[in-house]
Image (cartoon, grey):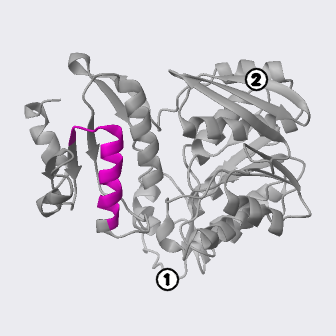
Amino acid sequence: MHNGHYFIEDAYSKGVENFVVNQNYRIPDFIKANFFIVKDTLVALQQIAAYHRSRFSHLDIVAITGSNGKTTIKEWLAQMMGDKKVVKSPKSYNSQTGVAFSVWQIENYHQLGIFEAGISKPGEMELLEKMIRPNIGILTNIGDAHAAGFKDDQHKLNEKIKLFSGADVIIYNTDNHLIHHTIMERFQDKKLMSWGFSEHSTYIRIKELITQNNFSEVHFDHIGVEKILYLPFSDQASVQNVMHCITYMLWAGIDFEIIQKKVNQLHNLPMRLELKSGIGGSILINDTYNADIQSLKVALEFLSQQAGNLPKVLIISEFDQIGIDDQEFLGVLVDLLQKESIEHIYFVGQIRDENASFFDMVVTCSFYKTTDELLHQINKLDL
């Protein structure tokens, strides 16, 4: 992460005349500008964002958190709610600074806000909640992403749901027992709009999920009414993501026929599982948004769905903050490669030849120290 103070002189040379700086910054004599000196610039930014949010107390705000799927749900929900004037987090702006910048976009004409919030350690979510102040919360799931900063899944879940402390409505999937029991215990005073296969699902109870090729049918009961939803995808992650959106839209009173029409118009997000045609009849799947085990499982499942009889190749970089050591990660990776019948894997980073024994009986391996090294050799590879 860069220190913004390093760029003040350049910003000044381009006409910027007002700066918020921390108390340790030494103001150069030649800069004739206004300086607002604070103890901590990040805290100042968050306080300004929280004040800005407080000026729009009438605005419905949906806040999304969880280990995976936040950005997809946010983008899809914004697409499907496109009849309203929606303000949302840009890209995956869900960090301590990203949320502040996201909230700052709110204007008087907006009718709905959709913001995502992500944390990597305890104590962060309280700060995000003060800025977003949602009245509707969506919890995606609890998985491997950013696991290193927490004792276990229960600890991580307890921290994440602090985002919903002031919310009126919480949307979640009851099929995860940890999530269901924690939500029920912690938020008995809130309206819980749950969905899933579980008999505990109060709002949407899925009776049957039929998947074929790249399409799915979801047969479900919505508070006593049988419905069938048709989805333009079949992978598990997409089905889960869209069901959170459907739950919100039904709660918001949107007609089911309109919801089905909106679902039919959903398109892939450019930052996640982007499918492209490659040279020589090859297919490229770009998944550079997340680096955790759950995301890898989803990406390899999607790869298998799209590949048909084509040989399957994985190019993978290093994973950070996954909460397990290298040996355990390599073991999990071997299992995934076997399950999805990957023929060749290209490693980029510090995983070196000494780990090749993990893969000898499963897949052909190639190792590269850096991306530049791989790119230098890529024209010689049989892809």
* Residue drawn at x 18%, y 53% as measured from the top left: 370
Q: Which residue is mark 2?
A: 228
Residue 294 or 170: which is nearer the viewer?
294
User: Are there few (<14), some (14-19), or many (20+) residues within 10 Å of tag 2?
Assistant: some
Residue 5 x %, y %: 45, 68
Q: What amino acid type should be assigned to the residue bearing mark 1?
A: Asn
In the shown orientation, is residue 8 left or right of residue 179?
left
Q: Indicate the quadrant where residue 53 lies.
A: bottom right
The magenta span reads 328-344
How far apart are the alpha carbons under marks 2 and 1? 61 Å
Vertical relation: 227 (above or below) 326: above
* Residue drawn at x 81%, y 25% as measured from the top left: 227
* Residue drawn at x 24%, y 28% as measured from the top left: 311
On whether residue 271 falls in the magenta region, the answer is no
The mark that comes first in sequence, 2 or 1, is 1
Vertical relation: 230 (above or below) 27: above
Q: Are marks 2 and 1 in contact (CB under 8 Å)?
A: no
Inspect this view and state whether residue 93 appears: yes
Give the SS element for disc 2: strand
In the shown orientation, is residue 366 left or right of residue 97?
left
Give the SS element for disc 1: loop
Q: Which residue is mark 1?
A: 24
Residue 47 numbered tag? none
